[in-house]
Image (cartoon, grey):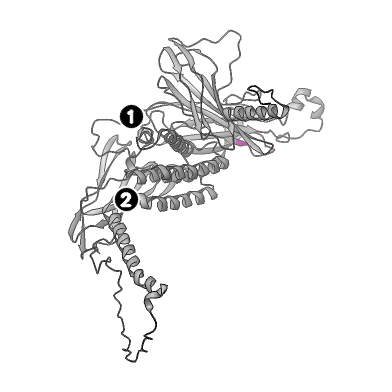
Amino acid sequence: MCGGNQPMTGKNLFIAAVFIAVLAGAAQALTITASVDKQDVGLGDQIALKVNVVGKGGTLPEPTLPDLSAFEIYSSGRSQNIQIMNGAFSSNLDISYILVPKKAGDFIIGPIIIRDKTGMASTEPIKIHVSNQSSPSKPGGKVSPQAGQPPSANRQPAQKGGDFFIDQFVDKTSPYLGEQVTLSFRFYQAVNLWDQPTLEWPKYAGFTVEDLPPNGRYYQVVNGRQYLVTEIKRALFPLSSGKLIIDTPQLTIKPDDFGTAFDPFSFFDRNTQDMFRRGQPKILTANPITINVKPLPEQGKPADFTGAVGKFNMQVETDKDSVGVDEPITLKVTLSGTGNIRSLPPVKLPDLPDFRIYDSGNTESVSNTNQVVSGTKTFEQAIIPKTSGVFTIPAISLSYFDPTSTSYKTIGTGARRIVATGQGLVDVGGAPKNIIGAGKQSLGYIITDFPKNDPKRDLSSSGLFWFLQILPLFGIIAAIFYRSHTQKLLADLGYARRVGAGKRLRSIFKTAAALKAQGELVGFYGALYDAVLGFVADRLNLEKSGLTIEDVKTHEKIPGDIRNELTAFLESCQNARFAPGGVTKNHADDLLENAGDLVGRLEKIL
């Protein structure tokens, strides 16, 4: 009999348990938690914020931070662990931040959000109380280790003495926004080492970084003791004005017992604890450096200023001055000089209503002569005259701020004359120009003795006959579609950019993969950022040079779910590009794979 309520059999219980377990696993596919080391602080105190993300798979998305405008925020490290159990991947990501309150009051660190294909997760809000005075240290209490660094009894303070110590300093503490700050790092070594020391650079939050080889090695006497000094210089370019902190690097070393003269009887004079302490790794740190970055002056700022800081020259050239209508001219604008070459913005062209303009990309070459970052950056544009005539390309100019003279300067070139001849694309029997070749055609001799047709054979009953009759019709239709497509490419810039977006994307992806294979991770992240942002600009028919991450966050044509992923991806590229310390090849592989998936979804939506 069949009743309304039947007892569950063992088999049903098993199926239900499995179903519930699957649902629970799916619900917990992605989790995120956040914690702080203290919630009651004073002005100037630091708050260590730790974010933990757990999820399935080898790649975890980047969390989106809430509004933290009440705090100065600095990145202080990240680590990721991947586990494989029963063939399934799981990842655990820890990200650390340092928050410094700007004013007194009660504040809330809002939910930190993370999203992936399985859904969304967020943290609980955290209350912070900031008093007007800095919190005093507790009597007899131990000073907690600096955030972002592992606690260790072997950590050595940044002091001048002992067998080893490190030091860092800068050539200026009040630079202008975008001006080069030269950081000098020195490792002082009084005894030999078993192995080469391991140096870990900080994240340099708020700066872009360029190395300044070669490294120096020399001897120096400090407090009556001779040291071998290894000096490394780096160029830092501040990205924002105000107070910025250059965190300390960490140097891990292992002392060599045979660094000093060996006495066979000294074994019996050694302290037992000292014997076991020998050979243990030591972590050396230096004092952080605070710099106050001055904003660029408003007085005298040109209207066309776009942020270039340094000292530059400009050269403009075209590959030809006379072309046919609809034939491209390559216009190259090359900037050379000293400053942050990689971050130079594109040079804005004057209004050219008689030309179609296409961005052909840019190339850069950076050198570090005399510890100063210099080089060249070339922007290429393809300009195509729409009609015949004599045209003038007006003077092209660039304004930049020179921190040496503390003034704005403008450089430029004279106007250029372009001659365009011909009629462009015209109808030739319904087909575009140049479809019919201009070469000579030879006529065969005329045949007069054709064989006579068989009157009993009806050609209309042959399928081949009718196929040959309609074949020209298909050819005409194809020609019409091709001609319409070609004219639309020439007349509709947005359509042309959408069609060519994929080809340009594949080309930049290929360049990015080559840079990654060569170990050029900074260039790789820059190419990956340009590829995805350029693809979005092409699909939406927006100027790439003016498109920012903030624009992506608020663009109504990009759906909200993928908009957040796209924003997180672009920010991850920029963070890795401008703060390369700690970036690994696995992170680059994951980001490249994420880029392919993201572009595939964008292509279906935009």
- The residue identified by callout 1 is 295
What span is colored magenta in the figure? 190-198
Going by the numbered disc 1, the residue's amino acid type is: Pro
x and y percent of residue 359 in the render?
33, 51
x and y percent of residue 522 in the render?
48, 43
Q: Residue at x 36, y 89 (%)?
A: 452
Q: Residue at x 82, y 30 (%)?
A: 265
Going by the numbered disc 2, the residue's amino acid type is: Tyr
Q: Residue at x 78, y 33 (%)?
A: 263
Observer able to see residue 62: no
Of residues 227 and 197, the one drawn nearer to the viewer in this rendering: 197
Quadrant for the C terminus, please: top left
Quadrant for the N terminus, please: top right
- Inspect the magenta stretch and tell me whether residue 175 lies in it: no
Give the mark nearest the N terminus, 2 or 1. 1
- The residue identified by callout 2 is 495
- Inspect the magenta stretch and tell me whether residue 192 lies in it: yes
Disc 2 versus disc 1: nearer the observer: 2
- Distance between the alpha carbons at the discs numbered 2 and 1: 41 Å
